[in-house]
Amino acid sequence: MSQLEQIKKQHQKGHVKKAIEGYLAYISKKPNDDDAHFALALAYKDIKNFEQALKAADEAVKLAPSAERYHQFKGQMHMALGQSDAALKAFRTSLKHNPNLYFSYLALGDIYLHREQFQQAEEQYRLAQRVHQEAPPAAVKLARLMLLTSRREAAGTVLQAAALHHPDDPGI
């Protein structure tokens, strides 16, 4: 097992601070390992240090600019820090690298909804549904948006379709 894998095992076992020390030591020896920077970012996120998590994710992106999961993670950290413009950019970038990222579409929809840009929000929720037709959150978010914009019948149709796919889901 590699040194990085050993550190990840510590992290998985919940020894986050010890794992952070391990990641930092590992990165000091191998600064071009994007996976190590990303693992460090995940560890910082686990202790709710979103600024450090974002810095580590930025390093991972510099080393692997087409890794969509790094951009998606950056979007999440920007959201945690209340930086919606930067989050919007990061989620859009993640989708440029992989247009099948369900959670990036949901996040973009949420950002647009928060900004009361309802048409853009609806578009993102519909794209999320296309990517993952079986997942109820996109349908529920779309239906709520439709209710907010006084489209009760359309909301009911969306929820009925989701309920057919997930009859046991209490969230629908």
Image (cartoon, rainbow, N blue to C red):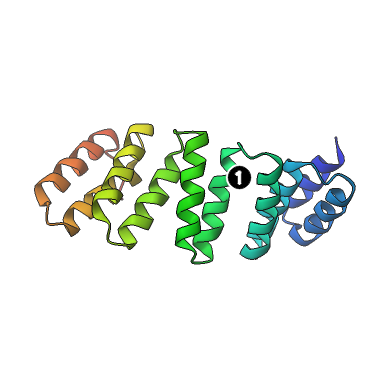
User: Is 166 on the left or on the right of 92, as rendered?
Assistant: left
Question: Mark 1 — residue?
Answer: 70
The vertical placement of 5 against 115, above or below, is above
Say how many tags the image has.
1
User: Is 36 on the left or on the right of 41, as rendered?
Assistant: right
Identity of the residue drawn at 45% across and 61% down:
84
Query: Mark 1, residues whose alpha carbon is within 10 Å: few (<14), some, or many (≥20)?
Result: many
Residue 103 found in image quarter: top left
Say whether residue 74 is visible. Answer: yes
Query: Considering the image in quadrants, where does the N terminus appear?
Result: top right
Label 1 element class: helix
Q: Which of 117 and 145 is in front in this view?
A: 117
Q: Which of 13 and 32 is in front in this view?
A: 32
Residue 46 found in image quarter: bottom right
The vertical placement of 24 against 97, above or below, is below
User: Is 138 on the left or on the right of 75, as rendered?
Assistant: left
Amino acid tagged 1:
Tyr
Residue projecting furthest to the left: 153
Identity of the residue drawn at 52% across and 63% down:
80
Q: Position of residue 117 (x, y in %)?
A: 27, 57
Identity of the residue drawn at 83% across and 58% down:
21
Q: Nearer the viewer, residue 52 or 65?
A: 65
Q: Where is residue 10 in the image (x, y as percent from the top left)?
A: 78, 50
Q: Position of residue 78 (x, y in %)?
A: 53, 60
Say whether residue 48 is visible. Answer: no
The vertical placement of 100 against 103, above or below, is above
User: Is 105 on the left or on the right of 126, as rendered?
Assistant: right
Residue 43 found in image quarter: bottom right
Identity of the residue drawn at 87% across and 53% down:
25
Q: Where is residue 37 in the image (x, y as percent from the top left)?
A: 73, 48
